[in-house]
Image: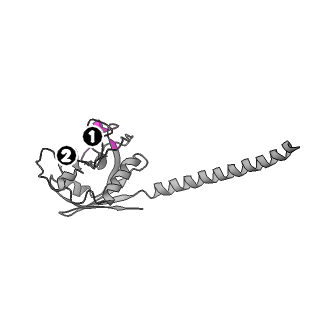
Amino acid sequence: MTGTVARPRTLRIVRALFVVAVTALVANGVAAQDKAARTPTAMIVMDNGGEIVLEFHSKDAPRHVENFVALAKKGFYDGQRVHRVEPNFVVQFGDPQSKTKPMDNPSMGSGGPGYTVKAEFNSRKFERGVLGMARTQDPDSAGSQVYIMLGPAPSLNGKYTAFGQVTKGMEVVDKIRVGDRIKSIKVVEK
């Protein structure tokens, strides 16, 4: 007799747990969609004038986007100088040493935030305007140095992490020279 009473009760408990689990999955899915819908953008304001708007690819490189956004919100990039410009290739910044050291210092371009970010290679192509993460020969050595593509570089595809795109201000990027200072990078949550 106890077996017949326990089964309906067990079924009710299983059904209730199922409803709770489905509700949680749906809620998490909605939260994930909301998070994706609120992908941040950033505005780089150059000290000598000009603004560059970046849109991030959170689905393709979530850790890189999170890292860049966190550094920007802390003011890490504010006051840094662009330490590398390769015509038709890249404009690169993100070395904290660029705030104070001379641009011809042998260590320029080797600084970072004190930690690294694991690679998130993806199918994004390194075309003009793409935002990529610089690294050493170690694929998991990215930190704070980033570059904006001035032209296509298929040799980087699948070997470096692309995590954003310039959506406005490429004409400003085209005029950047080594030593130009970044006044600020402001993150905007959508």
Element type at marker 1?
loop
Could you tell me how far apart the alpha carbons at marks 2 and 1 are, in whole angstroms? 20 Å
Circle 1: residue type: Ala
Circle 2: residue type: Gly
User: In front: 29, or 165?
Assistant: 29
Name the quarter where the N terminus is drawn.
top right
Element type at marker 2?
loop
Q: Is residue 174 magenta?
A: no
Up-down: is 137 above or below 41?
Answer: above
Taking the image as shown, residue 141 lies to the left or right of residue 106, namely: right
Marks counted in the figure total 2
- Give how far across and how far down residue 7 sits, in percent: 81, 44
Q: How is the image coloured?
A: one colour
Dot 1 crowding, Cα within 10 Å, few <14, some 14–19, many 20+: some
User: Which is in the foreground here, disc 2 or disc 1?
Assistant: 2
User: In front: 39, or 8?
Assistant: 8
First-in-chain label (2 vs 1): 2
Q: Which residues are magenta?
A: 148-161
Q: Are marks 2 and 1 in contact (CB under 8 Å)?
A: no
- Give how far across and how far down residue 3 sits, in percent: 84, 42
In the picture of the structure, the residue carrying the numbered disc 1 is 153
What residue is shown at x 39% (from left), y 46% (from top)?
61
User: In front: 91, or 153?
Assistant: 91
- Residue 109 numbered mark, or none: 2
Up-down: is 186 above or below 67?
Answer: below
